[in-house]
Image (cartoon, rainbow, N blue to C red):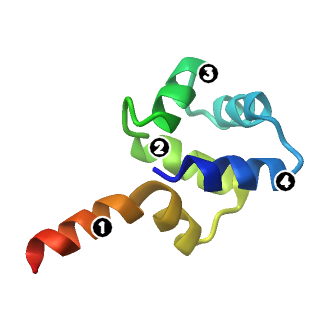
Amino acid sequence: MNKEKLLGIIKTKGLQVQDVIQLVNDNGTSMSSSYFYKGLRDERPFKVDEIKALANILNLSDEEIVDIFFKEIVSEKTLQVN
């Protein structure tokens, strides 16, 4: 989880975290503030529907989605395969 990149994109879009959480909920995906922050702290993974909602709201590219939510996982698996 690249929290700095996610928070940077939120800020660049002129939004606050609470705005994003509200937009996620308005789009039909339930997410509380505590769940969002637990995801940022890697205390729980973001669910697929949450990632999709965040990607839609923030207009994230496929590359940004991987960089923010999956890069660490992909890197670890790549290292394990070799």
Looking at the rendered structure, the secondary structure element under dot 4 is loop
Kind of element beneath mark 1: helix
Q: CA distance from mark 1 to mark 4?
A: 27 Å
Disc number for residue 47? none
The extreme right residue here reads 14
Label 2 with label 4: CB-CB less than 8 Å: no
Which image quarter holds the C terminus?
Answer: bottom left
At x 41%, y 47%, the residue is: 48
What residue lies at 18% left-to-right and 72% top-to-bottom? 79
Between the residue at mark 1 and the residue at mark 2, the CA separation in whole angstroms equals: 20 Å
Residue 10: horizontal and vertical position, in percent?
A: 75, 48
Tell me, for residue 33, which label it has, or none. Answer: 3
Extreme-left residue of the structure: 81
The residues tagged by marks 3 and 2 sit, at their Cα atoms, a distance apart of 16 Å
* Disc nearer the start of the sequence (1/3): 3
Q: Considering only order in the chain, which callout, 2 or 3, is on the residue closer to the N terminus?
A: 3
Q: Residues within 10 Å of mark 1 (few under 14, many from 20)?
A: few
Alpha-carbon neighbours of circle 3 within 10 Å: few (<14), some, or many (≥20)?
A: few
Q: Residue at x 83, y 55 (%)?
A: 12
Which residue is denoted by mark 1 in the rendering?
74
Give the amino acid at mark 4.
Lys
Q: Secondary structure at mark 3?
A: helix
Q: Earlier in the sequence, mark 4 or mark 3?
A: 4
At label 2, the amino acid type is Asp
Density class for disc 2 (Cα within 10 Å; few <14, some 14-19, many ≥20) is some
Residue nearest the viewer, comparing 24 with 80: 80
Question: What residue sits right under mark 4 in the picture?
Answer: 13
Judged left or right of residue 59, residue 47 is: left
Give the residue number, with chain letter if any, for mark 2. 49
